[in-house]
Amino acid sequence: MTKAWMTEIWITKAWMTKPMADATVPILDVRNVSKSFSVNGRTVEALKGANLTVNRGEFICLLGASGCGKSTLLRIVAGFETATAGEPLMWDRPIDGPAPSRGMVFQDYGLFPWLSVRDNIGFGPKSRGRPAAEIRDTVARYIDVVGLQRFADAYPHQLSGGMKQRVAIARVLANEAEVVLMDEPFGALDAMTRERLQDELLDLWSRTGLTVLFVTHAIEEAIFLADRVVVMSPSPGRIDAIHTIDLARRRDVSSPAFNDVRRMLSAQLHSHHARTAA
Amino acid sequence: MSAAPLAGPAAVTAPPAAAARAPWRLERLREGLLALAIPAVLALIWHLTTTGRPYSLIPPPAEVWTALVDLAVGGINDDAFSATLLTHLGASLSRVFGGFALAVLTALPIGLLIGRVPLMRQLLDPMFQILRPVPVTAWLPLAMILFGLGPRSAYFLVFLGAFYPILVNTIFGVRSVEPRLFEAAAMLGCRGSAQFARVVLPAALPSIFTGLRLGLGFAWVVIVVGEMTGVQTGLGAIIMEARQLSRTEIVICGMIVIGIAGFLSDRIVMLIGRRLLAWSPSHG
C-alpha cells in the first residue's frame, strides 16, 4: 500500500515540475493539419484539414476505419512525420521531430530486443544522461507500476504480447512523457489480455494526470476508454465529428447507455462506408 | 583423427551422479561420432590406397603422422622442419589475428557509415563493390611493391581477405535494422549520431558476428598466399617451402594444422557471439 502511494506521489511530481504554461493553453493543438504524399505519381491525401485541441489530462480516442488518417495524425503529433500544411503545436510551440515529452506506444511494441526489460525501461533516462542511481530507481519504480518484477531481467522475446506492451508503456512513463501516444496498442493482443490492459491503462491514467491520444478501430474500446472520441473517415482522411463520452467510469460495456453510444458511433462510421462504396 | 579416442574417455568419465545429464552427454557423444564418421572413412581410403606403395606421390597417413610429431617436437628426422611447428603456428596466428583485427577496426566503422549515411554509401559502396571480386592472390605483386617483402605484405593480404566479409555483413546488418527501432529511440530522446552506439550497432550485431566468423575464416584461407611474400616463418611459408622440396607430408601437416587452428578460432568467435547475442532467439 505504502509503496503504491509513494509511486503515485512521485509520478504526480514529475508532471508538476514541468514548466506549466497558462492553464488555458491546450497541451496539444492541431491546427488545420494536412498530410499528402505521392504513390506512383498519384497524390494521396492521408489527412485533410484536421483540427483538434487536447487539454492536459484528457483521454482522447481517434476512431475510424483503415485509411482514415488516424495513425497519420498520431505520427504527426509524435513528430515522426511532418505536416504538408497546417501546424501541430504542443504547449503552443510547433512540434518539430520526436521528443521524450511525447512518448509513443506502438502496436508492434518497438522494444529493443537486445535489452532486458529493465534496460528497455531505462533506455530513455539513459539517453537523456540521467545519473545511474536515478535511472535505477526510476526503472525499479516503473517495473513495479506495470507489475513485471519477476521479469525484470527477461529479454523481449521471452515475454507475452501483453507483457511486452506493459514494458512499452513503462518505457514512456519512465521517460517523463506528458503525452502518451498509442497506435492501436492492444490490437495484436487476445481479448482477455486486451481488457486487462485497458483497465490497467485507465487506472494509470486516472492516477497520474497523463494525457493520452489513443488510436483504435474498435468502437467499444474507444467508448470504454475515452473522454472524447474523434470519429474519422477515409478518402481523404479527415475528422468528421468529436463526441464527448459522458458515461461514468468504470464504464459498463453492457449497460444500455453504453449501447446507445455504441449504436450512434457505429451508424456514423457505417454511413461513411456506404458513402465510400457508392 | 586425434579426436576419436578423446570422445570415448569423455563419455566414460561421466560421473554416475550426473544421471540427469546423461542424455545430454550421450547426445554430445553421438554428435562427435557423427562428425568423425566421414573423415574416418576418407582417412581409411587414404590409408588403403597409399600404404605399401613406394612410388605413391601422396604419403600414407602414418608417414604424415610421424612428420607431424617431428614437426611438433622433433627427434625423428632432425632436419630443418623438426620442432618448428610452434614458431610457424605462432607466426601465422599473429598474422591471421593481426590482419583480422585490422579488418575489424576498418570494416566495422566503414560498414556502419555505408549502411547508415547515404552520402557515404554513394561515395564508397561502388568502389568496394568493384574491388571486392579481385582475388587476394591478384593483389600479391602490388602488395609486395607497396609494402615490401616480408610480414607487412602478409598482414595486408590477410587483412584484405577478412575485410570484405565483415564489411558486407555489417552493411547488411545496418540496412536491415527495423525502422521502428529508430522511431522508438528517437521518441525516447536518442537521436542523430547517438543512435549508432545505442541502436545501430546492437541491432546489427547478429549480422556483424556472421561477418566476423566469415572474415576470420577467410583470414585463414588466405594465409598461404599471405605468406608467399617472402616471410621465413608461418604455416603458409613452410607449405610453400616443403612443396619446393617435394616434402608432401609436411605440406599435408601444414594443411591439417591450418584446418584445426581455423576451426578452433572460429569456435572462440562463436562462443563470444553466443554470449553477446544471448538476447537473440536465433542465437544464444
Image (cartoon, coloured by chain):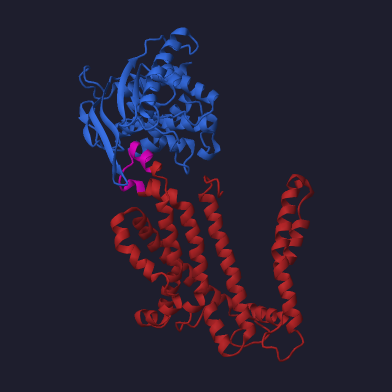
Chain colours: A blue, B red
User: In the rendered image, which quarter is residue A55 located in?
Assistant: top left
- Residue B88 on image: x %, y %: 54, 77
Q: Is residue B184 magenta?
A: yes
**Residue A263 versus residue A128 in the image, above or below:** above
- Residue A177 on image: x %, y %: 34, 29
Q: Looking at the rendering, in which quadrant would you find the C terminus of chain A?
A: top left
In this rendering, would B17 be left or right of B229?
Answer: right
**Residue A8 versus residue A174 in the image, above or below:** above
The answer to whether residue A10 is seen in the rendering is no
Q: Is residue B37 magenta?
A: no
Report the span colored magenta.
B182-195
Seen from the viewer's position, the closer of residues B59 and B250 is B59
Seen from the viewer's position, the closer of residues A59 and B279 is A59
Seen from the viewer's position, the closer of residues A265 and B145 is A265
- The residue shown at (73%, 47%) is B21
User: In the rendered image, which quarter is residue A208 located in?
Assistant: top left
